[in-house]
Image (spheres, grey):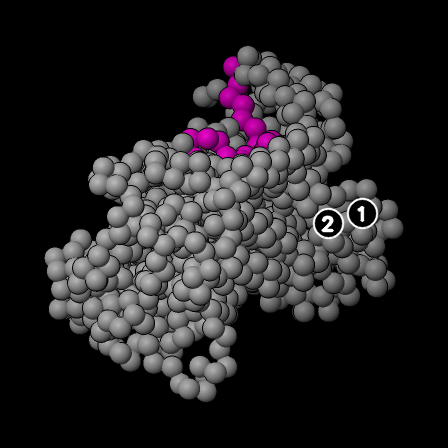
Amino acid sequence: MATFLYRLGRGAFRRRGRVVLIWLGVLVAVVVGAAGASGPSDEEFSMPGIESQKAFDLMEERFPGTAADGATAQVVFVAPDGQKVTAGDTRKAVEDAVGSLGGGPQVADVEDPFASEAVSEDGATAYATVTYKVEPSEVTDASRTAVDKAADQARAAGLTVETGGSAMDSGGGPGGTAEIVGLAAAAVVLLFTFGSLAAAGLPLLTAVVGVAVSLFGIVLLAGPLGLSADTLTLGMMLGLAVGIDYALFVVSRYREERGRGLAPQEAAGVAVGTAGSAVVFAGVTVVIALAGLTVVGIPTLTKMGLAAAGAVTVAVLVALTVVPALLGFWPNAVLSRRVRKAGTTIPRDRDRDRDRGAGGRGNLGARWARFVLRRPVAVLVLGVVGLGALAVPMTSLRLGMPGDEAKSTATTERRAYDALAEGFGPGFNGPLTIVVDARDAADPQAAVRTISDRISDTDGIVSVSQAGFNEADDTAVFRATPSTSPTDEKTKDLVETIRHDRPAVEERASATFEVTGTTALNIDIAAKVQSALVPYLVVVGGLAVVLLLVIFRSVLVPVKAALGFVLSVLAALGVLVLVFQEGHAADLFGVEQTGPIMSLMPIFMMGIVFGLAMDYEVFLVSRVREAYTRGETAGQAVVSGFQHSARVVTAAALIMVAVFSGFIGEDGSLIKMLGFSLAAAVLFDAFVVRMAIVPAVLALLGDRAWWLTTWLGRLLPRVDVEGEGLGHARSNSPGPYPDGSVEARV
C-alpha cells in the first residue's frame, strides 16, 4: 500500500499538469451534466415491509390513479379577533380564495371548508385542502405561486392566512451560509497551524474542488436515483470536512519531510505513501460504514449513505493526486518562513528529533503526552466518567419524524400548523389513516361501519371521518383524529392500542384493516430504526476491530479504539437528547420546538462518526507505532507520536467541528441535528478519547499494547500504513536527499 501510494505521489508531482487537467475535465463534465439534470427531489421516507407502507401500497392498488402519498396543500384561514370566518364579507373572502385555488395548475380538487365542515367549533378558523394530480416532488413553482396568490387575496380582506402541506415544501439544499462559516473557520485554524497562507490555502482549495465534483455529481444523479435535497447538503457537509482534513494530513507530512531535507518530489512521494496510506484507510472506513446503512432497509437512508460515501471517495482521490500535483507547482510555498529562510536542502539530525520527542522539552503535543504518561489512571478515569455522564440522557432517547411543528415560527408552514392545532386540536395535524380491506366481507359497508365505530370508541380518538370506498366497493379509507399531537408519546401508545385490539375487531367485522398515514408511518420507521441501533453499533464496532487489527497488527489497540468510538457516540447522543429533546440550551442552538430525535439521525451519525473516529485513531496511533517499530520504548513512542501528530490531529478536529457546527443553522431537522451531533461527537472523540484516553491506555498497557499472537500474525495481511516498506522503493529513486543518500527510512 505505502509503496504504491509513494509512487502515485511522485507521479502526480512529476506529471502535475496532466493531473490537474484530468480533474478539471471531470469537473467540467459533471457541471455540464448537472446543468440539464432535474436536480434533487423531495422523496418521502418509506420502508418496505412495515405495516404503514403495506397500507400505502394497498391504497395505490385499490384506488388506481390516486397516489397514497400524493401532494396536498392546506390553506388555513383565521378570522380577525372576535369575528368568524362564516360571517358576511369574511365568508365571501374565503370562498373567493377557494375559487382561485381551484383554477391553479396541477390541481385535482379543492375542498370548500364550508361544504366539507372544515370550520372550527368557535368559527374562528377554517381550512381548504388542495389535492394535486402529482406527487410532492413534481409540484411546480407555478402551482405554489397560485396558492400564494390566493392566500394574498384573502389577506387583503383582513384574514390571517397561512399555508402548509407537502405541496408547499419546495425542498432545500446547501444555502451557502454554513459552507462559508465552515470555510472561514477552517482557514483560521489552518493559518494558525501552518503559519503560511499557501499551506493554509491549499487544503481549502483542494477540498472545494472535491466538493464541487461531488455536489454536481449528486445533482446529475438526483433525478434518476431519487436523491433528496438533504443528500446534497450532507454531501457538502462531509465532503468539505474530510476534504480539508485529508489534504491537511498530506500537506503536514510533506512539510515535515521537507524540513528533514528531502527533495520536493521525494517529499511528496513519502507524504502520500505514509499520510496517504492513513487517508486511504480512514476514507475506506467512512465509506464502508456509510454503505453499510443499506442493511437498515430504508431506501432514503441507503441513498443518502451511498451519496455521502461517494463524496468521501472523491475527497480521498483528491488528497492523493491533486494535493501532490499542486505541491509540484509551488514546492516551497507551503513551507514555514523559518524553513524557507534556513534553506530546504539541509537535512536535520533525525536522532536529535527523536531525542527531543523522548526526553527533551518538545512541542505542546509531546508535553501533553508526558503529562498523561505520569497520570494515566487519573486521565483515564476522568475521561471515561465524564463521557459516561454525558451519555446517560441517551437512555431516554425518543425517535420520531419532526414535521412542520419543528420549523421556525418565521415560516408559514409552522404558523399554519399552530393555527390548525389551536382551532381543531393538537391531533388534527396527524390523523391516522385506516385502510379497510373488505373484499371477503359479505356486506362491505357494514364491515367498514363496524371497524369505524370500534375505532371511534377507542380512548384517545376524538373523531372519525366518513369512509370513502373505491370503485369496486371492496376497500375503504377513513381518518381517525387523535386527541394528542403527532409526536406525543400518547399518540404512539394509541396506535399500538388500535393494532393490539385489531384481531377482535376484524373477527367481528369479517374484514381486515391497517393503520397508516404520516403519523403511523413515522412511528413505524422510528421503531424499526431504534431496533436497528444496537445491531448496527455492534457491526460497526466489530468492523473497527477488524480493520485496526489489520492496520496495527495488535489485538488490544483495536479493542480500545472500538470502545472509545462507542463511548464518544453515546455521549454525543446524550447531549443531542439534552438539547433537542429535553430543551436544555435549546435557544442557544436555534431549536424552537423540542421533541423526538429524527429517526434516521442516530444511526446515520453512527456511520459517519465511526469513520471520523478511525481517522484520528489511524493518524495518531500510526505515528506511535512507527516510533515503536523504530526501536523506542512504549512510553517514548507515545511521546514521539504525539509530538509529530497531536497538533495536526487537533487542527483537523477543530476544522471538522467548525464545519459541522455551521450546519446547525440549516432549516432541515435532519441536517440541523446531524450538524450538532457530529460536532459534539468529533469534539468528544478527538479531544477526550483519542488525545486523553488513548495515550492513558497505551501508557498502562506498555509493550502489551502491541501484542499479537503468532498464528494471527501469519493470517493477517501485511498493510504498511507507517511506510516501513518505502526503503526499497526509495532506494530505486534518485536523490531523496541532496547528497543522493538513501540511508534513512522515514
Rendering quarter of residue 153: top right
Residue 612 visible at all: no
- Residue at x 71%, y 52% (from the top left corner): 56
Spot occupied by residue 6 in the image (x, y as percentages of width and height): 46, 56
Q: Which residue lies most toward the front here?
A: 739
Badge 1 density bin: few <14, some 14–19, many ≥20, Cα 10 Å = some
Mark 1, secondary structure of its residue? loop
The numbered mark at residue 477 is 2
- Residue at x 78%, y 66% (from the top left corner): 510
Spot occupied by residue 100 in the image (x, y as percentages of width and height): 69, 19
The quadrant of the picture occupied by the C terminus is bottom left
Callout 2 amino acid: Val
Mark 2, secondary structure of its residue? strand
Number of marks in the image? 2
The numbered mark at residue 63 is 1
Does 41 sit left or right of 643 as displayed? right
Query: In the figure, 219 relative to 154: above or below?
Result: below
Q: Which residue lies most toward the bottom here?
A: 711
Badge 2 density bin: few <14, some 14–19, many ≥20, Cα 10 Å = many
Q: Are marks 1 and 2 in contact (CB under 8 Å)?
A: yes
Rendering quarter of residue 191: top left
Query: In the figure, 430 relative to 98: above or below?
Result: below
**Most foreground residue, 45 or 512:** 45
Does 154 sit left or right of 439 as displayed? left
- Residue at x 75%, y 51% (from the top left corner): 59
Spot occupied by residue 160 in the image (x, y as percentages of width and height): 51, 21
Q: Give the foreground label among 1 and 2.
A: 1
User: Is 240 contained in the magenta span?
Assistant: no
Residue 344 visible at all: yes
Q: Where does the magenta region start and end?
A: 158-179
The numbered mark at residue 561 is none
User: Is 167 contained in the magenta span?
Assistant: yes
